[in-house]
Amino acid sequence: MKKDFRTSIGGQALLEGVMMRGPDKYAAVVRAPDGLRVREERAPYPKEKHRVLGFVFIRGVCNFVQSMSIGMKTLSWSADQVEWEENDAAEAAANDKAVSAKKESGFGRGLFAVSMVIALLLVIGLFTVLPTWLGGLLSPWLGERSFLRNLAETGLRLIILLTYMILVSLTKDIQKTFAYHGAEHKTIACYEAGDALAVENARTYSRFHPRCGTSFLFTVVLVSMAAFLLVSLPLQALEIGGRLGSVFLRVGIRLALLPFVVAISYEVNRLIGRSDNALARCIRAPGLWMQRITTREPDDGMLEVALEALKRVLPEQEGKDAWGTE
């Protein structure tokens, strides 16, 4: 493998583990008292099922939805494994049977769906409604129609995000999860460099990775600001919604624009992921800074978990996982 190889394989830190997603399937690996526990499932990219889902702008939304679904599913699964540690073997076996019975009856799927809806509402409230409401409080000084209010709301959104990440990083469990995030990055870097996938090799790489999802998050914030500004200007000219000062109207517009924002952000992310020019480095810089909060140095056991997850999703055909092929 060439040293400048960029893979589309990505991952996510779990509770006591790591999930890796390759071009054909995903694998989640967690550490339990009885050893490593693994969950594998075939999950080809949406375009493999329907060609139209691989078209520009459509693929971004489809891949994002699939990634969110896999991420929530494996995070919930890892939580079940962590709960296993809190019981003795006999109790754990009984709990596993009970959980399986609930899932077979549809209860587990329903509970999972409810938890996803609640999480989505919290995200909308914290990162959309709250900064929009706070921006409204500043409107007497910034103006209802001004570019400055849009800029202020974006700044508030970033401040809330950073504050939230800093606060959650203070808890011991999250610190451990962030260490698994660092293990995921080191493992991917080792693979892209063409080194043997071994703990001693992965240990030498940086925990910061330029194509982390954190960079995508900052791209979404910036694209969202630009999209809202472009849409709000003609609406204001037509005097639709008065002066667009209503919090509910502004939130509604942002939510309606979300699929377009995700689609555009995805394409931007693909482009900057291929390049190392000055512009690409500037766009990636905030994400790399953010990783100082969201990653920590992992121990060898965490690297072992991440390596196991990566090995299980490597494609048989070399190069099938090249960046930009997803």
Image (cartoon, rainbow, N blue to C red):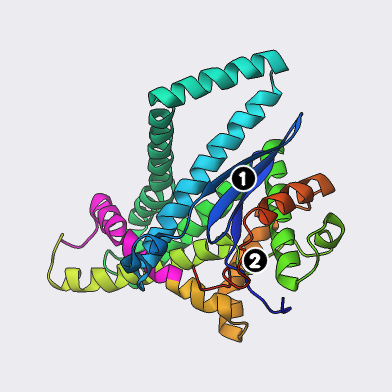
**Residue that mark 1 sits on:** 28
Does the magenta run of residues contain 245? Answer: yes
Q: Label 1 sits on what residue type?
A: Ala
Q: Earlier in the sequence, mark 1 or mark 2?
A: 1
Q: Nearer the viewer, residue 187 or 122?
A: 187
- Residue 280 in the image, given as x and y percentages of width and height: 57, 80
Q: Label 2 sits on what residue type?
A: Leu
Q: In which quarter of the image is residue 209?
A: bottom right
Q: Residues within 10 Å of mark 1 (few under 14, many from 20)?
A: many
- Residue 169 in the image, given as x and y percentages of width and height: 66, 45
Magenta residues, start to end = 242-266
Residue at point 44% right, 40% down?
A: 119
Residue 288 is tagged as 2
- Residue 170 visible? The answer is no
Does the magenta run of residues contain 162? Answer: no
Q: Nearer the viewer, residue 324 or 186?
A: 324
Q: How many marks?
A: 2
- Residue 234 visible? The answer is yes
Tell me the SS state at disc 2. helix
